Image (cartoon, rainbow, N blue to C red):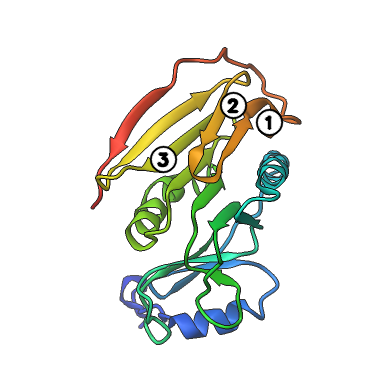
């Protein structure tokens, strides 16, 4: 008699096993509490937005103490000593900025542990995770993180989460091609018209007032 699917125990990988596999893999995978998950491909619109974002941020960081890392750089969100553990999150962001000297998980230098600003271009398949558990782990385990930026594909809209001195996160919504996002932590001002330079929206809304809300620490 076949074993019910619900009773089949999935193999849980350690962090060390994941990194060994990932460093040999041709495609990218994320690690979350022992599970290895393949990353979905990106749409042409996602790719265009991400490229323009990298160009804009990269240009503004020239000559400054902060540097940007491409979507191929991993980020660790978990305890420091985790090599033989199945707990933690190792993920990829669409763009990551580090200020000062970059710090890494190990000597290979492909896993950042001190991100300052993380950018994600939202996709239908990953948007809930990016807003939910991924952000929760970022803000819990990365004390260096000051800003989390979510960029929509379907309309000119950016959600900017900024860490406050009291530990809460303030969310600012920036909407409309005439608007711009100000990131004081890295001294950058990003015009939405530049980030969405090559994107054709079926309809474009006029810029709306910025709204704010807070996110409490867990």
Nearer mark to the viewer, of 3 and 2: 3
Q: Which residue occupies 66% across, 76% down?
A: 25
Q: Is residue 204 above or below residue 107?
A: above
Q: In front: 12, or 200? A: 200
Q: Which residue is under mark 1? A: 196
Q: Which residue occupies 54% across, 61% down?
A: 100
Q: Is disc 1 placed on a helix, strand or loop?
A: loop
Q: Marks 3/1: CA distance?
A: 20 Å
Q: Is disc 3 placed on a helix, strand or loop?
A: strand
Q: Which residue occupies 45% across, 49% down?
A: 130
Q: Is residue 66 above or below residue 101?
A: above
> Which is nearer the N-term, disc 2 or disc 1?
2
Bin the neighbour count of mark 2 within 10 Å (Cα to Cα): few under 14, some 14-19, many 20 and up.
Answer: many
Q: Marks 3/2: CA distance?
A: 17 Å
Q: Residue furthest top?
A: 206
Q: Is residue 26 above or below residue 184?
A: below
Q: Are marks 3 and 2 in contact (CB under 8 Å)?
A: no
Q: Are marks 2 and 1 in contact (CB under 8 Å)?
A: yes
Residue 144 falls left or right of residue 180: left
- Label annotation for residue 156: 2
Q: In front: 126, or 96? A: 96
Q: Which residue is under mark 3? A: 161
Q: Which residue occupies 59% across, 30% down?
A: 154
Q: In front: 90, or 160? A: 160
Q: Is disc 2 placed on a helix, strand or loop?
A: loop
């Amino acid at each position: 008699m076949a074993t019910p699917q619900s009773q089949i125990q999935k193999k849980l990988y350690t962090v060390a096993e994941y990194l060994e596999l990932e460093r040999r893999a041709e495609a990218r995978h994320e690690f979350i509490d022992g599970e290895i998950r393949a990353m979905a491909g990106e749409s042409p619109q996602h790719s265009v937005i991400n490229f323009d974002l990298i160009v804009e941020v990269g240009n503004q960081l020239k000559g400054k103490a902060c540097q940007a890392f491409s979507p191929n750089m991993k980020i660790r969100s978990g305890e420091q000593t985790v090599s033989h553990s199945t707990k933690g999150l190792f993920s990829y962001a669409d763009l990551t900025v580090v200020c000062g000297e970059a710090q890494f998980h190990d000597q290979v230098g492909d896993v950042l542990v001190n991100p300052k600003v993380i950018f994600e271009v939202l996709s239908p398949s990953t948007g809930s995770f990016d807003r939910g558990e991924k952000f929760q782990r970022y803000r819990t385990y990365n004390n260096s993180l000051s800003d989390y930026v979510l960029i929509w594909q379907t309309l000119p809209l950016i959600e900017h989460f900024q860490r406050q001195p009291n530990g809460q996160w303030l969310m600012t919504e920036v909407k409309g091609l005439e608007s711009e996002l100000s990131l004081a932590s890295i001294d950058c001002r990003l015009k939405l018209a530049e980030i969405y330079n090559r994107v054709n929206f079926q309809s474009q809304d006029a810029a709306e007032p910025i709204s704010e809300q807070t996110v409490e620490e867990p």
